[in-house]
């Protein structure tokens, strides 16, 4: 049994809570559906004696990661997660249209939204395929979020057609094509990483209308991993 499999078995089947503390901070890791509650309560009460920042990594249909600077905030969040850990998530992708006038929009997305920079290297192009009735990824920018995590091939996990993720994030493309206006979204999705781990990733995106050939329906998408106004647990 490899180390990762052994750790997962300990967290899932035995309900153990893994705590790692050192010069760079403290990490607390557990599975929400089978934790040893006494261990979680114990560690939450002792956070003030452990170095900050405090990284909470917990599994609920995928790994969540949350970081806190203050021990009181981390303590309250652990207690809150314990109280909500019996929920069953029916969805793995959450999309919510955002308000570009509010703070929190990454600078790169704000530039794209304002029409000052389409950032070719940081964007992904999708074109409507009449044969299959779906948008397909045709180009992945070398500095895009997808490229940094999965590479530039337009056949990697986030680019694959027909799955739940594809349908959820691609639904807004039609609005952009039909209105000719850009769209700003917050997205929170459980995504399969190259090593196989399922991780919840929060990101913001701007979708821009595009046309590569006359009459071709297409969009350009820029994304940045960032905090989102979507609460799951």
Image: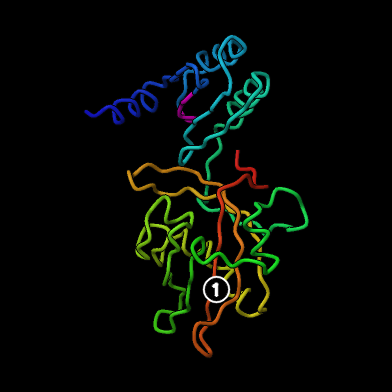
Q: Which residues are the magenta region?
A: 28-33
Tell me where residue 18 sits by quadrant: top left
The front one of 100 and 189 is: 100
Tell me where residue 25 appears, x and y as whole percent.
Answer: 52, 21
In the displayed structure, 25 sits above or below 126; it is above
Tell me where residue 4 appears, x and y as whole percent.
Answer: 31, 30
The front one of 201 and 148 is: 148
Q: Residue at x 60, y 32 (%)?
A: 84
Tell me where residue 207 appears, x and y as whole percent.
Answer: 60, 67
In the displayed structure, 224 sits above or below 25; it is below
In the displayed structure, 216 sits above or below 111; it is below
Tell me where residue 114 sits by quadrant: bottom right
* Residue designated by label 1: 219
Q: Residue at x 58, y 75 (%)?
A: 174
Dot 1, crowdedness within 10 Å: few (<14), some or many (≥20)? many
Tell me where residue 119 sits by quadrant: bottom right
The front one of 44 and 109 is: 109
Magenta stretch: helix, strand or loop mostly: strand
| Image quarter in which the C terminus is found | top right
The residue at the far right in this view is 101
The residue at the far bottom in this view is 214
Tell me where residue 175 appears, x and y as whole percent.
Answer: 63, 74
Q: Confirm whether the magenta stretch covers residue 223.
A: no
In the displayed structure, 123 sits above or below 219; it is above
Q: Secondary structure at mark 1?
A: strand
């Amino acid at each position: 049994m490899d180390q990762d499999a052994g750790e997962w078995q300990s967290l899932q089947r035995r309900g153990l809570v893994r705590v790692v503390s050192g010069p760079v901070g403290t990490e607390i890791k557990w599975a929400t559906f089978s934790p040893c509650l006494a261990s979680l309560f114990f560690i939450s009460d002792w956070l003030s004696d452990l170095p900050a920042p405090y990284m909470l990594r917990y599994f609920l249909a995928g790994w969540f990661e949350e970081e806190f600077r203050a021990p009181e905030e981390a303590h309250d969040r652990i207690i809150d997660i314990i109280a909500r850990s019996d929920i069953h998530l029916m969805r793995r992708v959450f999309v919510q249209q955002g308000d570009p006038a509010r703070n929190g929009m990454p600078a790169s997305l704000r530039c794209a939204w304002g029409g000052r920079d389409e950032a070719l290297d940081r964007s992904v192009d999708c074109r409507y395929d009449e044969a299959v009735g779906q948008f397909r990824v045709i180009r992945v920018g070398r500095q895009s979020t997808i490229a940094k995590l999965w590479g530039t091939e337009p056949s990697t996990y986030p680019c694959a057609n027909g799955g739940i993720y594809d349908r959820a994030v691609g639904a807004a493309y039609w609005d952009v094509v039909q209105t000719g206006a850009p769209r700003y979204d917050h997205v929170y999705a459980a995504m399969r990483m190259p090593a196989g781990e399922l991780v919840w990733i929060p990101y913001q995106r701007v979708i821009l209308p595009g046309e590569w050939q006359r009459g071709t329906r297409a969009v350009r998408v820029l994304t940045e991993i960032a905090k989102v106004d979507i609460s799951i647990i």
